Structure formats: C-alpha cells, structure tokens
Image (tube, rainbow, N blue to C red):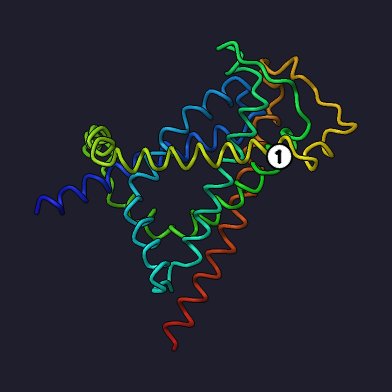
Amino acid sequence: MVKVQGKKKTSKVRVYVDILLFTLMVMVLIPQTTGIPIHEWASFILIMPFLLHLIINWNWIATNSKKLMGRQFKKTVFDYFFNWLLYLFMLVVTVSGIVISEAALPVFGIHFTPDGFWSVIHNVSATLFMAMLGVHIALHWRWIVGALGKLKFKSDFHHVSEVGTIVKKDARQLLVIVGISIMLSLVIWGFGYSAWADSFRIGSDVQNGENADKMPMGWMVYVLPLLKVSVLMGIPALITGVILKLKRRRASIA
C-alpha cells in the first residue's frame, strides 16, 4: 500500500517536473524572442528539472538496460536508444551553449572567445533537438494525455514538495547521472580541439554579440521563433504518431 502511494506521488511530481521542463525548453529554443540573457539563464535553470526527469525515470532506464544485456529487448528498443540519443544531443546543445556564452558566464568573470565551430554546432544541434523532442513527445503521447487528464492542478500541487524526498532517496542515481554527464561533456568539449573543428573556424566571421542584451523589435520576431519550434517539433511528432497508429492497427488485425 505504501509503495502504491509512493508511486502515485512520484507520478504526480513527474507531471509537474515535465511541465516545467517543457516550458523552459520552449523558452530556451526561442532566443530571438527572449533575448540572449534570458536564453542563457533559462538554459542553466533547465538542467535541474532535466536531471529530475532522469531520476524519476531511472527505474525505466535500469530495467530496459538489464533487458538489453539479457537479450530480452523487444518492444521498447527504439524508444530506449532514441532516449539515449536525445540525452546526448541535450549535452551537445548544453556544452556548445556554455562555450559561446555571452551573458550568463561573464557575470562570474568567465569569458570565452567567439568560436565559429561551437556556434555552428550549437545551432545545428538545437535544431535537430527540436525535431527529436517532437518524436519523444509522440512516443509518450498516451501517457501525457492520461497524466494531464488525471491531474488536479491545485489540489495535487502539494506533491511538488516530494522532490526533496525523491532526490534524497535516489541520491546515488543522481551522482551516476551527473558523473556520466560530466564525462560525456568533456568528450564533447574535446572535439573543439580537433582538426575537424578547425576546418569550421577557417575563414569564419563570428559576431561577438554586441547587441545580444537587447530585446528584438517587431512582432514578427516574437511569432516566427515560436512558429519555427512548433513546426520542427510538430511535424516529426505527427509523422511518429501516424506510424505508431498504423503499427497498432496492424497488430490488432494480426
């Protein structure tokens, strides 16, 4: 009984964490609208719900990893490897964003030289991440609709206080995730010293963001970034949804 109640609380917390994570992701993906300072600070804040999302889903990760080792892996094989790929892209976007930081890190006296390689990597990886996030949402759409349908926003909000309990209970898993993230981030950062990276830098004129702290002008600049995010996430999500529906229909016929 206690375990069931614990799972219910964790499920409620997961919904709020995911809502916060998605909201911050949308903010981060529209720097033309928010401006560079908000974009960068929101990116750092986003790391916290992202880590919480991984901790809450740790059992799924561990269970499917064991199935993979035991060759009992069938239904969730694509979802499993896709989630790892999404995680890697998240790290690439984060590392490249840190290296080209113009507003957040300078506050702490940390300054990076404008780098054409990391600017290209950041823009390309962020664009691909949007499309992959759309697929991720489509893969878990049934859970999202079900969880939001059961959610009583005001009366269930007190479950957010369970975040501290979850972090304490899964402190070891958190350390594992942070450790893996740091090691992979260092590997990604190391690519910046490769000959391949230097080829991006040759002849590239990188603007140093002189007007980065100014908010963009004109209503189209506020609408178009949101439209871009909606299209880049929406089209892959719709395609994935159609494929899943066809697969389910074929399975029911068989």
Name the residue nearer the viewer: 148 or 78.
Answer: 78
Q: Nearer the viewer, residue 240 or 5?
A: 5
Where on the picture, by quarter, is residue 200?
Answer: top right
Relative to residue 68, is residue 191 drawn left or right? right
Question: Which residue is at 61% across, 51% downward?
Answer: 131
Residue in the picture at 46% in, 27% down: 45
Total marks shown come to 1
Q: Quadrant of the C terminus?
A: bottom left
Of helix, strand and loop, which one carries label 1? helix
Q: Is residue 231 above or below residue 237?
A: above
From this viewpoint, which residue is outermost toward the right?
203
Q: From the viewer's side, name the closer residue of 72 and 234.
A: 72
**Which of the 4 image quadrants contains residue 184?**
top right
On the image, the x and y values in percent for residue 111 come to 66, 16
* Residue 164 in the image, given as x and y percentages of width and height: 25, 32
Left or right: where 168 falls relative to 93: left
Kindly give the residue lying farthest to the left in the view shown. Answer: 1
Q: Is residue 151 left or right of residue 28?
A: left
Quadrant in the picture for residue 20: top left
Q: Is residue 104 above or below residue 254?
A: above
Query: Measured along the vertical axis of the image, is residue 172 above or below residue 27?
Result: below
- Residue at which label 1 appears: 121
Look at label 1 and name its amino acid: Ile
In the rendered image, the quadrant that contains the N terminus is bottom left
Residue 210 screen position, x and y as percent = 75, 14
Q: Mark 1: few, some, or many residues within 10 Å (few <14, many ≥20)?
A: some
Judge left or right: residue 232 versus residue 77: right
In the rendered image, residue 216, in percent from the top left (x then y), is placed at: 69, 22
